[in-house]
């Protein structure tokens, strides 16, 4: 993609927008950033104004003076300025698409999406590649923008991308050498017209693959089978329940007549076994020895806010699963323990049906503690099925769960909701949880 002397309008002053603007400037292009929020709501507005042309408080017609528009993933595609841009045939792309167009052809892309497990799987793949000795970068939805790296240069062997459905909405030429959908369960239903619309967007990850590329799917995921016609490459499957390309049997992962032990790994639960299988499949085209993969599985550390052990206080163990922002994640959390747990749930809802958790809560929850904006909705869904406590304040709900616990109990923050009712993101929610736990005393 030719960047020099071209004009790019960027909608959104978040991480990916700023990174794209910086890369455009570095390559000799002209970046104009448009932010819907007011200037006083943007913490780094002074630094941004010093480096780029920009506007605050709304998206004006100035955007229509650019050759290409780059849309940040959190911004809906149906806002008026984008409709006008489409009328004027101004190309609208994502930061992922922009980065792909400028990356060096030497670098191979491994792209991971799914409703749950994306961060762990992408991080594990990155860890395997680094353990092997490759120069690998980890980017996308996981925290660092794709365009923030020197991707236009030859030195990067692998680019491992965690991609959300939002980032996949404006894919045009983007092509991954290896692409995986881990699972598709209801999520972001407040953004999409239907569940099928959300699922189909996930399948954009395979859009430009050919027979030379690898597509990875979960054989246990019924939704994925519905859209298999959108894949042009031959897919390979992983499964917890059936023998397929890679599967789990008798406490080992079996792939290509070789067995991988999970005994000394630090990530637990059936969902993480699935994540390990998908990671092994993802690196399989690149000739990595079995011994290196086994070592990587055993040296990989769990990510923060994903079933993260926090502390034991007076014999009571606390786990931070703040990243569990949908019901499927909570199912995994409940299945990760051999005993019943006290679970803290609630936050900002995304239009999910919480009642689907009732069988899992009845089986695995000693008590459910509700907090946040979804208290009434969750209470209505669970009442009469499980023991419930509703506590408005976040710190108070943690203290209540602790006060009712006894030695040997486990308390897990696994909200099934986003954090936006009280926190700027799931990381802040998880870190707040950890700080509160660190102060607890009987």
Image (tube, rainbow, N blue to C red):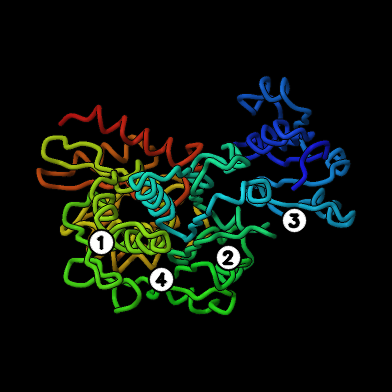
- Which circle's residue, 1 or 2, is located before the other in the chain? 2
In the rendered structure, the answer to whether residue 125 lies left or right of residue 202 reads left
Residue beneath label 2, please? 198
SS for tag 4? strand
Residue in front for this viewpoint, 209 or 335:
209
Label ID, residue 218: 4
- Residue in the image at 45% along x and 68% along y: 216
Q: Nearer the viewer, residue 158 or 347?
A: 158
Give the percent coordinates (x, y) of residue 33. 74, 35
Q: Are marks 1 and 2 in contact (CB under 8 Å)?
A: no
Q: CA distance from mark 1 to mark 4?
A: 18 Å
- Alpha carbon of mark 3 to alpha carbon of mark 4: how far? 32 Å
Chain-order first, disc 2 or disc 4: 2
Using the numbered discs, state the Cα–Cα distance from disc 1 to disc 2 in whole angstroms. 26 Å
Residue with the mark numbered 1: 335
Which is more N-terminal, label 1 or label 3?
A: 3
Identify whether 254 is placed above or below 411: below
Mark 3–mark 1 Cα distance, whole angstroms, equals 39 Å
How much space separates mark 2 and mark 4, taking CA atoms?
17 Å
């Amino acid at each position: 993609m030719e960047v020099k002397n071209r004009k790019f309008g960027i909608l959104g002053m978040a991480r990916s927008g700023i990174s794209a603007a910086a890369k455009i400037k570095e390559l000799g292009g002209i970046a104009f950033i448009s932010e819907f929020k007011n200037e006083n709501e943007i913490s780094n507005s002074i630094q941004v104004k010093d480096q780029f042309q920009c506007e605050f408080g709304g998206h004006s017609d100035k955007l229509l003076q650019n050759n290409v528009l780059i849309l940040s993933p959190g911004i809906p595609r149906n806002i008026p300025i984008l409709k006008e841009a489409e009328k004027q045939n101004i190309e609208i792309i994502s930061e992922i698409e922009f980065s792909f167009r400028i990356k060096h052809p030497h670098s191979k892309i491994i792209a991971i999406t799914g409703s749950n497990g994306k961060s762990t799987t992408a991080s594990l793949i990155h860890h395997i590649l680094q353990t092997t000795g490759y120069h690998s970068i980890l980017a996308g939805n996981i925290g660092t923008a794709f365009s923030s790296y020197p991707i236009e240069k030859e030195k990067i062997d692998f680019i491992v991308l965690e991609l959300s459905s939002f980032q996949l909405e404006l894919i045009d030429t983007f092509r991954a050498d290896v692409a995986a959908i881990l699972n598709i369960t209801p999520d972001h239903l407040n953004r999409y017209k239907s569940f099928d619309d959300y699922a189909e967007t996930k399948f954009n990850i395979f859009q430009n693959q050919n027979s030379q590329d690898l597509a990875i799917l979960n054989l246990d995921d019924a939704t994925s089978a519905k859209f298999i016609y959108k894949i042009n490459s031959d897919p390979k499957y992983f499964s917890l329940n059936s023998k397929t390309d890679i599967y789990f049997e008798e406490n080992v992962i079996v792939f290509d007549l070789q067995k991988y032990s999970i005994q000394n790994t630090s990530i637990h639960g059936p969902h993480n076994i699935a994540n390990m299988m998908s990671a092994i499949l993802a690196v399989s085209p690149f000739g990595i020895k079995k011994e290196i993969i086994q070592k990587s599985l055993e040296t990989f550390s769990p990510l923060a806010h994903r079933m993260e052990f926090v502390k034991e206080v007076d014999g009571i163990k606390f786990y931070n699963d703040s990243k569990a922002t949908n019901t499927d994640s909570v199912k995994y959390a409940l299945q990760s323990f051999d005993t019943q747990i006290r679970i803290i749930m609630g936050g900002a809802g995304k239009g999910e049906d919480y009642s689907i958790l009732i069988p899992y809560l009845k089986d695995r929850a000693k008590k459910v503690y509700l907090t946040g904006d979804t208290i009434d909705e969750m209470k209505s869904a669970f009442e009469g099925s499980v023991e419930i406590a509703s506590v408005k304040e976040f710190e108070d709900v943690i203290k209540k769960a602790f006060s009712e616990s006894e030695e040997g109990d486990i308390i897990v923050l696994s909200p099934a909701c986003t954090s936006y009712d009280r926190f700027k993101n799931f990381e802040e929610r998880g870190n707040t949880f950890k700080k509160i736990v660190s102060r607890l005393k009987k």
